[in-house]
Image (cartoon, rainbow, N blue to C red):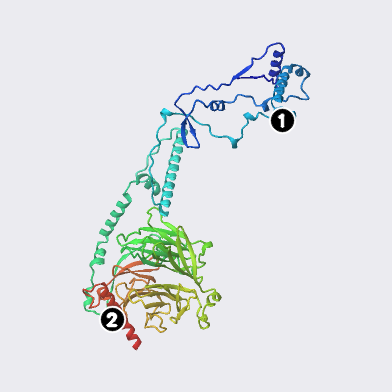
Amino acid sequence: MLLRLAPKLRTRSRDDSRDILDTQQGVREPDILIRLTSVNKRKQTEIVYNFKTGVYEVVREDDPLLHILTLPSRIVHTSEMPPRKHQHRPVILHTLDSEAEECAQVSRREMEELYDGVVSREELARIDSQPNPFNFSERVSQTTRLTQKNLAIQTQSPPSTTFSINVGLWDIYHAYKEDYIKVLDRELEMEREKEKERERERGPTKPKRTLDPIVLPSPQPRETFVREYLNLPGLPLAARIIERMVNQNIYDDISQDFKYWEDGGDEFRPLEGSLLPLWKFHHDKSRSLIVSDVCWSPIYPDLFAAAYTAGDIGGPEGTGMLCLYTLKNPATPERVFHTPCGILSLQFHPKHGSLVAAGWSDGTVVTYDFRSAISPVIIPSITTAGKHLLPVIQVRWVQTEPGEDLSFFSVALDGRVTQWHLHASALYHTDILDFNIVDQLTASLAAHDREFLEGVATCIAFKPDDESVLLMGVDTGVLFQCCTTSATHSLFRYPAHTSPVRRVTWNTHHRRVFLSCSIDWTIKIWLQHSRSPLVVLDLGSAVAGVTWSPYSSSVFVAVTDEGRVHVYDLFLRKCRPLCVQSLVQRRRVAATCVAFNPFHPIILVGGEKGHLIALKLSPNLRKPHKDAKGADAQQLQEIELCKMERLIATANKG
């Protein structure tokens, strides 16, 4: 089958006119012949992909249509041809185009004979004037060109394996941090290369002058030195171990006293004891700050955290600091974190030793995760998510079930007692009480209880065996006991003090006994649901802090603003302390906080001017009960309960 295509002449340029003149003189272009055949000579190994079955199939010889459809098109698009008629076309061109017109007329007659009775002449003329539909394609109608493969070189698909791993939030965070560090390293390397290129462009540098032997060159920055010369695996751990060994050799006498010191004078003074000063902890920038709070780690016996602030609560704002210290290296803190404002309170999580919650003087509550040695994970509260408006006085963690979000409570001077839930990388709050919104709080209370809600909460404490029971101290001097799980927040009022309550804490052995201290110079021991105190003690000065002993139900330690430490044992003597000792003998240093180590008989006392000291109790201050020798844990617990029950019975008789 032959198909003859008449040559179409172009008249848009001077070259086209020359071609037309050549045609007029008798020079004709050769006819274009395209032979369409159904004979398809193919190899037996040719295959084509079948989208229906999803596999490659052998091309059959009786399929000539495939070869015809895959031929590249060589037909000239009619849109590229000049118009048939133009009003400005020269007259001579009409005479030269006669042969082309005859060919077009023959083609139209053949089409009319072929589609006679099916399509009208006007419709055929309209179709003929349109662009070639067989060479027209749109982007949406295009398909991928089938690539043919040889059956002999087709191979099996490569083997695959299933890989799975559990990825947590901290893994993703550390991956991003490592990638960020790599990007920084690449940028630094590019900067070095650019600097070297600039130096090469500048040419040879002038010879350096010899330095005077007395004048030393400026030291290299610490970060660059560490990055370039100390990038060795295991070096930080080895350096830390060496540093601790050196410090233990320097403070060997103090380490021996911490382990083996016993005051021989206690044998001649049965009802008196003493405190032995051990280490003094300080930082270069802590001299101008006040130690606002200290807290021992409940997991690591030698680790504790200290919070620093620039001034008293409500005073001028300033920078703050959070330091992690260890008894193995008292010369310098392990970690130091500077804050734009003072830190007033902090506490370790009771189960997760790397988590610390802190309250700032601007009303922000922050959680620190110290598991990363490079940079800790810090999650602060934000203004749009319940941030306190005034300084946060105290923060306290609560126990949660496995799988639940970690939770802690905070109390601030804006009158709110708020519960915070640590979820992923954000803190979500729930206000438990708000002393400023009296109408909302008293709506669910009885008429005789509405007059109790006055002042602002200053401290909180949760009952050890039932954390739904919350004890709050108020700046008016009263104590409130409420239930955090109840919608009505039923309150029980204790008429405790005449001045703001600074600290309230539950007994670690007898779960119904707690004590409170205040600026009115007094410490009071209370029995739950009793409006009259069991014991009232006057220390002669404003009490800054108080804490129960972890090894005895009757021993507690209190510090005053005058810098004196008072140690009481209510089982041996209620009226007077067993020990009263000043922190510094030569000058007066005001004490601000105290904390008992849960593993060793030592206490930490913090004060102004960055003063932070560890003290060890003498044998009389930690003397066990006569029946405690050889007793197991259950028997020791019963002995401690009996000691406190005896105190309760004696107080009730009085």
As helix, strand or loop, the secondary structure at mark 1 comes to: loop
The first of marks 1 and 2 along the sequence is: 1
As helix, strand or loop, the secondary structure at mark 2 comes to: loop
Viewer-nearest residue: 363 or 30? 30
For the question of whether residue 508 can be seen, the reply is: yes
* Residue 468 sits above or below residue 89 on the image: below
Instruction: Report crowding for label 1: few under 14, some 14 to 19, many 20 or more residues within 10 A (C-alpha).
Output: few
For the question of whether residue 316 can be seen, the reply is: no
Across the whole image, how many numbered discs are drawn on residues? 2
Residue 119's tag is 1
* Quarter residue 321 falls in: bottom left
Nearer the camera: disc 1 or disc 2: 1
Q: Residue at x 32, y 85 (%)?
A: 649
Q: Pointer 2: what residue?
A: 572
* Residue 337 sits above or below residue 108 on the image: below
Q: Quadrant of the N terminus?
A: top right
Locate residue 322, reporting x and y percent: 41, 61
Locate residue 560, reporting x and y percent: 38, 75
Q: Quadrant of the C terminus?
A: bottom left
Tag 1 and tag 2, C-beta contact below 8 Å:
no
Viewer-nearest residue: 323 or 140? 140
Locate residue 400, reporting x and y percent: 40, 66
Q: Which three-letter amino acid code belongs to the residue tagged 1?
A: Val
Residue 582's tag is none
The reply, left or right, for residue 88 in relation to residue 180 is right
The reply, left or right, for residue 41 in relation to residue 282 is right
